[in-house]
Image: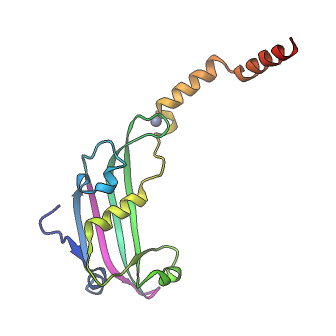
Amino acid sequence: MLPDQPQKIEPLHLAKAGKKIAGQYVLNDMHRLCELLHDNTGLVSFTLEFTRDEEHKLYCVVGGIEAKLHTVCQRCLGGMVLQINSPVKLGMVNGQTEISKLPDKYDPLILDDDPISLLDLIEDELLLAVPISPMHELDHCSATRIINKIHDEAPNRPFAILKKLTQKVHN
Ligand SMILES: [Zn+2]
């Protein structure tokens, strides 16, 4: 973490003052996220602008998060690098009941009386940006090569097996 980066923030105060926060965290500090990774090295970069959306009459946080995550492909179980470039669009609400009033383009940020952890906020956004089943592009996944090989070697195999089975029944 950069030395001048606040650990705790009060989003509403920052939005009323029109503040901007940009910085970096090491991935290793994000313990929930690290459970999804097979290598915790790397950085998360973020820019957050706390501001007022005059059109929708609400305070919001807009910005972006960037990270390179070392995760596991769910098709071939090989290591893969997942590039995250995720926009942040949070609308501040005072409680669960206000969430339904938020315009579609915003995710809710529920305000609390206590300051919130900046790291938790960034980690939450990053967790939402990670796909449930990350996979290589088809052309770059070793599972694709294996599946193609099976298809090439025995294109009609299921029918061949079926034929054998029916022969057995008749005999
Ligand atoms: Zn793969």
Quarter of the image where one finds residue 52: bottom left
Instruction: Write the residue at 37% across / 63% down.
Output: 125
Residue lying at the far top of the rendered structure:
171
41 above or below 107? Answer: above
Q: Residue at x 29, y 42 (%)?
A: 39
| Image position of 142 with respect to 43: above or below | above
Relative side of 85 to 17, left or right: right
Visual colour scheme = rainbow
Q: Position of residue 108 (x, y in %)?
A: 43, 75
Whole-percent x, y for residue 85 in the image: 38, 56
Q: Is 53 situated left or right of 147 in this image?
A: left
Q: Residue at x 66, y 18 (%)?
A: 154
Vertical order, 163 against 107 (above or below):
above
For the stretch drawn in magenta, the main secondary structure is strand
Q: Is residue 50 magenta?
A: yes
Foreground pick, 160 / 22: 160
Asked whether, in this view, residue 58 is left or right of residue 156, the answer is left
- Judge left or right: residue 64 versus residue 144: left
Q: Provide residue 107's location: percent of width, then percent of height.
A: 45, 72
Residue at 49% from the left image edge and 84% from the top image edge = 97
Q: Is residue 153 above or below residue 59?
A: above
Give the quadrant of residue 59: bottom left
Q: Which stretch did the figure color magenta?
A: 44-57
Magenta residue check for 34: no
Q: Nearer the viewer, residue 65 or 117?
A: 117
To which quarter of the image does residue 77 belong? top left
The quarter in which the C terminus is drawn is top right
